[in-house]
Amino acid sequence: MTPNPLPADPLNQPQPLDDYNLFLADLPLREALAAESAGQDHSQTLTRLGARLGTPETFALGRQANRHGPELVRYDAGGRRIDRVEFNPAWHQLMTEVTASRLHNGYWADDNATARAARFMLHAQVEAGTLCPVTMTYGAIPVLQNTLLRDGAPCADWLSPLQSPLYDPSDAPASAKRGLLIGMGMTEKQGGSDVRANTTRAEPGGDGMYTLNGHKWFFSVPQSDGHLVLAQAPGGLSCFLLPRILPDGRRNAIALERLKDKLGNRANASAEVEFHNAQGWLVGEEGKGGRTILEMGSHTRFDCALGSTGLMRRALSLALYHARHRHSFGKALIEHPLMACVLADLALELEGYTALLLRLAHWRRPQAQAHEQALARILTPAAKYLICKRGAGFVVEAMEVLGGNGYIEESDLPRLYREMPVNAIWEGSGNIMALDIMRALSKEPDTRDALENWLAPLSRVHPAFAVAFTVIPPLLATPEEHRMRDLAERLIHLACAAVLLENGNAAVADAWCHGRLNATASQYGAQVREVKLLLQRALPEV
C-alpha cells in the first residue's frame, strides 16, 4: 500500500522566526552601540553572539527551561536534609552561554559598558530567567571588592572564581569552584520594600562570622554560591554575605521552605527560606546595610530596563516578521495602513529606549565625568520606572498583530508577556523608583543642574522639545512626591529625544518628538510619522 503523504504546509502561516542573527537584525542597537562606544568596535563579537543566540536550538532551550522549571528536593534517600534545587539540562546550557558572555563579571575586569548592555539585551530575547543570577552577581562584585574580597579579607579566595567566565553548578565551597554566582535576600513577610522592618537578627561570633536567625520571603536564586542578606545587627540594619556551602564543606543552615510559584520567570528559581544559626560575613559596617544594598541595586535596576527592552525587541521582531509574511484581504498585513502605523510606533519606542540605555551605560562607567554620573543617577530609576512599565502593554500590542497565533505558547509571546511584570516589581516597584528620583533631587542637587544643563540647549533644536522642556524646571526645583511618576515619564521622553537628536538621525528624532513629546493619543499607532523608515530600520528581511 502507498503510505499516506504528509499533510501539506498550512496556507498563509509564516514559518517560525527562530533562525536569524539577533544583532545584525537590530539596526537601532548597532547604531546606538557605535555612537556610545568611544571609538571601539564591538561589531564582530556581537555578530558572532547574535548568530549563536538566534538559532532554533537556542530558542528551543529557552522554551524547554520554562516548560520544565526548577524543583526543590528537600531530602535525600536516607532522610537527610539537602535542600537542593534541580534544573532541567536546558537551564544549565543557557547558564553556560550567559556566563561565557561575562554579563556577570566582565565589566569589572576589562569589558566595555555599552558592549555589555548590548549583550544583555540580546540574551534577554532568548531566555530572561538566566539574567537574574548574572545581574545580581554583577551588582554584588563592586560591593564585595571594597570589603570581603580584598587581600587578607575573609573571602579573598572568592575573587578568582567570581571573575571566571565558567558556569559551575556543583555543591562545593566557593574557593574550590571554577565559577561563582551571587544571589540576594532582602524582603521579609512583614516588610516588603520597607527593609527597615526586617526582623532577622544577626549576632557577632568570635570567629569573625555572624550568626543569623530569621527568614526571607523572597530569596532570589537559592542555588547561588552566596547571598547578600539584610539583618538587624547590634549596630542596626546591616548587610551580610551568606555562603551556601561553608568553607569547611558543610551546608549552611539555610532551610529552603518552598520555591515560589511565579507568574513568569519560571525557568529561574526564587525561594522562601529560614535561617537557623546560619553563618555569614558582615559586608561593610554595621548599620549601613541599606546603603550597601542601594549600591548593588543601582546596577541591577539598570539591568531591569535592559532586560525589558530585550524582551520588547523579541516581541517586535515576531510581530514584524508575521506581518510581512501573513496576508489578509489581498495583501500582506504590513501593507495595511493601520497595521503599519502600529508596528512603526512600536519600532519608534524601541529606537528611543535603545539609544537612551546605551547612553546611560556609557555614563554609568566609574570613570565617567561628574555631570554624566549625575545624569545616570537620576535617569536610571526613571528608565527602570517607565521602560519596565511599558513592557507588558508593548507585548500585548505585538500579540494583537499575530491574533490568536500570538496567544498560544508556541509563539513565545505569552512567555514574553509573563516575563514583563517582574522587572517592574523586582529591585523596587514603580513608587520606589519615583521616591528614589525625589531623593536624588532633594539630596543631590547636582542631578538637577546636570539635567537642566543637558536638556535646555536642545530646546533650540526642535520646537516640540522646547515646549516639553518648559514643564521640567519647576518640577525639578520643588520635587513633590505626588508628581514624581509624572516627572519620571517626562524625563525619559525628553532624554530619549535628546539622545536621538544628538546621535544625528534627524528623521527618527523628529518622529520621536512628534510621537512622544507632542502626542495627544496614548495608544500605539495613533500618532506616528516616518512609518516607512521606521519599519525598514526595525527588522531586515529574514
Image (spheres, rainbow, N blue to C red):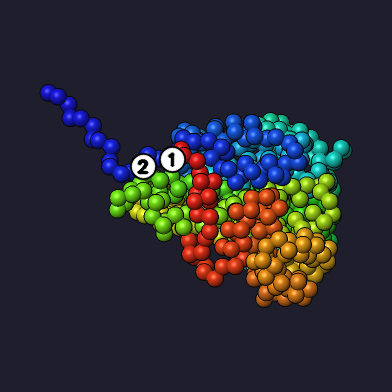
Relative to residue 100, is residue 345 depicted above or below?
A: below
Element under disc 2? loop
Element under disc 1? loop
Q: Mark 1 points at which residue?
A: 17
Residues tagged 1 and 2 counted as in contact (Cβ below 8 A):
yes
Relative to residue 97, is residue 215 depicted above or below?
A: below
Name the residue at 25% across, 35% down. 8
Residue toward you, 400 or 172: 400
- Residue 137 visible in the current orientation: no
How far is mark 1 from mark 2, CA to CA? 8 Å
Residue toward you, 203 or 224: 224
Relative to residue 427, is residue 90 depicted above or below?
A: above
Q: Position of residue 336 (x, y in %)?
A: 38, 55
Q: Which residue lies furthest to the right in this view?
A: 152
Q: Which amino acid does label 2 sit on?
A: Pro
Residue toward you, 514 or 13: 514
Would you call the spot at circle 2 few (<14 residues within 10 Å), some (14-19), or many (20 or more)? some
In the visual, does 469 lie left or right of 314?
right
Residue toward you, 49 or 340: 340
Name the residue at 57% across, 38% down. 23
In the visual, does 123 lie left or right of 359?
left
Q: Position of residue 126 (x, y in %)?
A: 52, 42
- Residue 501 visible in the current orientation: yes
Q: Position of residue 424 (x, y in %)?
A: 59, 59
Q: Residue 14 carries which label?
A: 2
